[in-house]
Image (spheres, grey):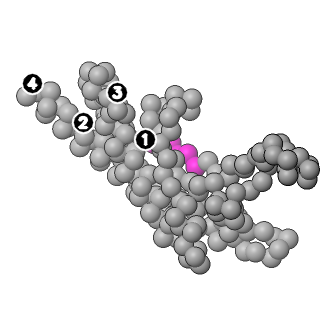
Amino acid sequence: MDSSRPVQGLDGLLDAMRQLPAEIVSKNGGPARVALARGARRVRDEVRANAPERSGFLKKQIVTLRSPRPQAYGGSELYSVGVRGGARAKYANTKRNRRKGRVGKTYEKPSNAFYWRFQEFGVPSRNIQPLAFFRRAIRKLADPVIDQFAADLRKALDRIARKLRRA
């Protein structure tokens, strides 16, 4: 579920970032890292608040992740909010698994909240209605998070500019 949105009005901030020395802007993600992380945590918390309660396991599996390779997606910093799991484990090459013909096949780990998809999108054949807890949170917070990101980035750039003027 890719939810991207064009952002307008950040031209002044981008120009200010370009004028700063590269070693300051790119250091540990620079000022954008903190602002993006704060916005991602806000979305994560809203998704958790909307998620169905039951055992609480699904809420614990909703996480914020920082991408180790944001350049692959055309950015310098990338955060995403998602549900942990989805990766399937392979059966090991053991005597028992060879006997049962399972070697090389995959299985769902019991520690995954794989069922989040069923709750989010629904299953018409099983008469399960979609709860849309994830999409509802993103729709609700898209604009406020972008505004918060711009304000945080502006504040961080002002702080860096003051520090550079003193030096």
Indicate the position of residue 111 as horizontal and vertical percent values. 63, 61
The alpha-carbon separation of the residues under discs 2 and 1 comes to 18 Å
What element does badge 1 sit on? loop
In magenta stretch: residue 4: yes
Of 157 and 40, the residue lying toward us? 40
- Residue type at mark 2 is Leu
Instruction: State if disc 2 and disc 4 touch (CB < 8 Å).
Output: no
Give the Cα distance between marks 2 and 3.
Answer: 13 Å
Under mark 1, the amino acid is Gln
Q: Nearer the viewer, mark 4 or mark 2?
A: 4
* Residue 38 visible in the displayed image: yes
Q: Position of residue 85 (x, y in %)?
A: 63, 54
- The residue that label 2 is drawn on is 157
Residue 167, which numbered label? 4
Residue lying farthest to the front in this orientation = 95
Q: Is residue 102 left or right of residue 18?
A: right
